[in-house]
Amino acid sequence: MAKNWAVVIGINEYEHLPRPLKYAKRDAELMRDFLCKEAGFEKVYHFSEDSSDKQLRPTRSNVMRLLHLMFEQPFMSAGDNFWFFFSGHGVRQNGCDYLMPADGFTEDIANSNISVNYIIQRLRRCGADNIIMILDACRDEGKSVEGIGRQTAEQARQMGVISIASCSPNQISYEIEDLQQGVFTCALLEGLGTQGKCATVERLNQYLIHRVPELNREFGKPKQTPLTVAEPIEKSHLILCPKYATLADVKALKYDASQAELNQDFDFAEQLWIRVSAASPGDIDAVKAFKRIAVAQVRSEALSDRPSSQARPQTEKSPQPAPANSAPIEPDVPLKSERGVDYTKLRDLLATRKWQEADRETAIKMLEVAERTKDGWLRGEDLDRFPCEDLRTIDQLWVKYSNGRFGFSVQKRIYESLGGSREYDRKIWEAFGDLVGWRVNRLGGVWLYYNELKFNTNKAAQGHLPTTINSWFGAQGHLPTTINRWMGMGGGIGRGGVSLLSRRDL
């Protein structure tokens, strides 16, 4: 049975800050209660300034001691869950993010506070394959120091830790007196509970990026957009609350597990199938998968122990070199389509790394699916109704053959890392264009022509492809991407992209 442990910290009063928080302590208490009573966590280390246990008061030495002693050796395994929740102040210095303990101060940030980088490194040592770090820490309305966010997101991405921040960089996380809570934690507990029933990371993220701004508008607070980082993409499908898991949630997890098997990443496949078993006890597909993986691992070990001359079957003829510009095509991404569209050519182009031809083929197929071939472009409503099965096939083909560099799901993660949501924001959209290499900073920032894009994995930015449709079907190829011009001219620019990158099935 899976272990579920957590560290929960909430701090209202700071020894050296004149700006106490009102509800951080209560937020932590409510999170502790949820984890213990609703989520079935066996151990929750709750740090509070009024704790009867002196070792659980949120000072730097107490928190650092726990991180040092508890995480010195692995104590969990695949299928286990460890959560870290912090509600309080956060600070940033020299590009590094820090959480402020009760005795932290801004005059010596590095030595009196706790580095988020250090926290992530220690959490990774616990042995669990699912680590979730939730930070409600951008509270500095006084603007005396820069808020946290950017380094935390990047470090979590690199270390494979799921990170959920209460707001995007350069925003503030607000407390609401009428709620007697921080707005983020209020929405978080709604999403995890009976109101949102968000079983997966992906569904929780979608709930948060809609619910938090909604609450802020309701109570007259400025915009606040939560930021979730879950990489690799399979982590977004991990099930947080099994009792709310739907058949579609389990199906997505099975798909990821099957893909890991096909890629011969058996350790990762086993972790994912364990997750399937936890959400769907006795699942026959999981039972069969464990047997397949065990056999595959035994065979792999046997081959590795054999002399190199015996490691592969002997043939009468010497192996011939592959023809120029060819690559082995492995049909391990199911070419599924709800509309009967054939994706064989797209797969073959991607497998042979013909990126520009694949980009154009993607446009052709998406128009075919949407029955918009004669029009030559897609509308926002076409993207909203675009079949999930087809969208996933196209995306996974790009992700697989680019080794995770390209694909709509890659673009979605970049867009959301900037605070992007279903609500169109011109500044966020332009920042997204900058990051994926569709814009350049000349004359105040301009979108590139299609012939200026980079169809080379060594030169192109992550998320640069696919660009598709309106980059060459519409407006004389003036702008680079399907998702940048699907809504047509004028004020519609970018809104089609928002429709696509807000899809829950990416």
Image (cartoon, rainbow, N blue to C red):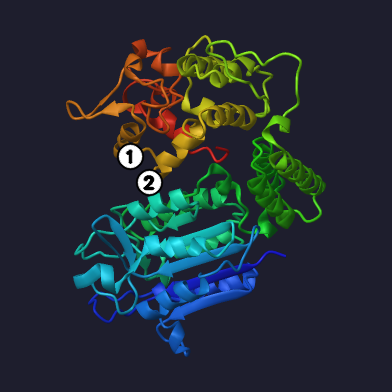
Residue 49 on image: x %, y %? 40, 83
| Residue drawn at the location 64% of the way across and 42% of the way down | 265
> In the rendered view of the protein, which quadrant contains the C terminus?
top right
| Residue drawn at the location 49% of the way across and 13% of the way down | 357
Residue 185 on image: x %, y %? 46, 64
> In the rendered view of the protein, which quadrant contains the N terminus?
bottom right
Q: Residues within 10 Å of mark 2 (few under 14, many from 20)?
A: many
Helix or strand or loop: what does disc 2 sit on? loop
Count of labels shown?
2
Identified by mark 1, the residue type is: Ile
Residue 439 on image: x %, y %? 29, 27
| Residue drawn at the location 59% of the way across and 54% of the way down | 198
The answer to which image quadrant residue 489 occupies is top left
The image shows residue 69, relative to residue 482, as above or below, that is below
**Label ID, residue 314:** none
Q: Camera-side residue: 437 or 87? A: 437
Q: Is residue 249 left or right of residue 66?
A: right
Helix or strand or loop: what does disc 1 sit on? helix
Disc on the earlier residue, 1 or 2: 2
Q: Is residue 288 left or right of residue 152?
A: right
Residue 282 on image: x %, y %? 81, 54
The image shows residue 14, relative to residue 231, as above or below, that is below
Q: Camera-side residue: 45 or 126? A: 126
**Label ID, residue 419:** 2
The image shows residue 38, relative to residue 223, as above or below, that is below
| Residue drawn at the location 65% of the way across and 70% of the way down | 40
Q: Which residue is mark 1?
A: 428
Identified by mark 2, the residue type is: Gly
The image shows residue 24, relative to residue 161, as above or below, that is below
Q: Are the residues at dot 1 and dot 2 in contact (C-beta closer than 8 Å)?
A: yes
Question: How far apart are the two marked residues, 1 and 2, measured between alpha carbons?
Answer: 7 Å
